[in-house]
Amino acid sequence: MSIRRSVLRSAVVAASLAAVALGITGPAQAAPARTSAATAAAAVTSTAGGSITRSEIIERAQYWVDQGVPYSQSAYYRDPQGRTYRTDCSGMVSMSWHLTTSATTWTLPDYSTQLGSLDDLQPGDALNNVNTHVVLFVGWTDSSHSTATIMEEARPGTNARKTTYSRSYLNSNGFKPYRYDKVVESPVTVPDKGMTNVTAVGDLSGDGVGDVIAVEAATGDLYRYNGPDYVGRSARVKIGYGWDSMSDIVGVGDITGDGVADILAVDAENGNLYRYSGPDYGGRSARVQIGTGWDSMTNLTGVGDITGDGSPDLIAVEKSTGDLYRYSGPDYAGRTARVKIGSGWNIYTSLTGIGDITGDGVADILAVDTETGNLYRYSGPNYNGGTRVQIGTGWDSMTNLTGVGDITGDRVPDLLAVKASTQDLYRYSGPSFPGGSAVQIGSGW
């Protein structure tokens, strides 16, 4: 955050939950871990104030993430070569760029050039709002550039971390793209991007336990993972390819009447909404177009039948207004038939349907508040803002929150989430999803 502000802004990310020993009370502000020999030796090729490659910028930022450096506007911490930098947002970017001093959000533009568009960003560039906050750009998670992976020092009580920001959040909060003037254009070694669009789809394998599908970010391949453990790459089943061109993949239950769950997805290239029939979700030749203009919406979320007509319904947030709309299945007719049921929903990330956890017979949803990282429960069928109940804090270190139904046998829906900094997959038990219930069930997600 800007060191010039008297009131600290709560920074955030897209989908996520911080944990202390897998707890959910927010990140610990413990002393940074000792430097490993391997990390400390990373990319010692630049000098302070000199030219630097993109790979080295990313490695330097990752160093603070690995060390768990706590946020502070008054403390300083070393880079891999021992030079110290202030441990706030602009200090982290200064360290990553190997500047000779700890700049502020106001002075970082003196060392960089503003780019024309967010689409011009490359790894090692920065996203800066000079009045509030700055983060280091790592890469886009998808071909449509809707979600950015970033590294940052976010706010007091958190440590240096890698997480995600949605494009809509970046735009609505005034972030501008900047490139360090002394960056050397060179190939960047990007770590395994893991999986995106983790989506619950019910029981596809016939074993009585809910399954999930997910897109491998590096290849665009679609995989099915069998519950309840969703074991990793060795046991997954590839069921499609080319899915990196799709966004907002969402499970909506069986809308074709064949007894198998279907999914909806937005084509990032044309904004069309398509229905794919399970269990294999055949590709472009088998999909059915059921809508247009859906690239104006985000956080598509299946919520089951909340209108009582026997067909699963869908909710989605309009990017330009933040309004929440309900669409009735099975066709999810567009703007003329949709029903507005809320406003101000552009402050939320990681919306997910979770089933009925309040016992009133209507599906509930969970959402992460972008500004605070708090996790909230909203009761259906209207999901009014005044009805929200806070059930957790620090959820802005997790992504891909996915309600998977009851996979533990306690008759209460459970939740999956991926820790952004490690790509580990965790299971949380309902109905309150406490951090202490977190069980790591996978890695490389």
Image (cartoon, helix red, strand yellow):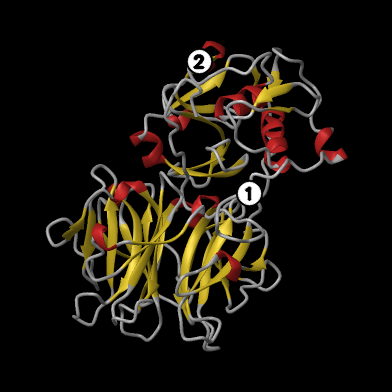
* Vertical arrangement, residue 122 with respect to residue 417, above or below: above
Residue 355 placement: quadrant = bottom left
Residue 42, image x, y percentages:
80, 33
Residue 221 shown left or right of residue 283 in the figure: right
User: Identity of the amino acid at label 1?
Assistant: Ala
Task: Quickly name the residue at label 1.
Answer: 28
Compare residues 423 and 37 and report the one nearer the observer.
37
* Vertical arrangement, residue 123 with respect to residue 26, above or below: above
Q: Nearer the viewer, mark 1 or mark 2?
A: 1
Residue 109 is marked as 2
- At horizontal 54% and vertical 83% (from top left) the residue drawn is 205
Residue 84, image x, y percentages:
73, 23
Residue 414, image x, y percentages:
49, 74
Q: Regarding mark 1 in the picture, which secondary structure is present there? A: loop
* Vertical arrangement, residue 171 with respect to residue 82, above or below: below
Residue 439 placement: quadrant = bottom right
Q: Are marks 1 and 2 in contact (CB under 8 Å)?
A: no
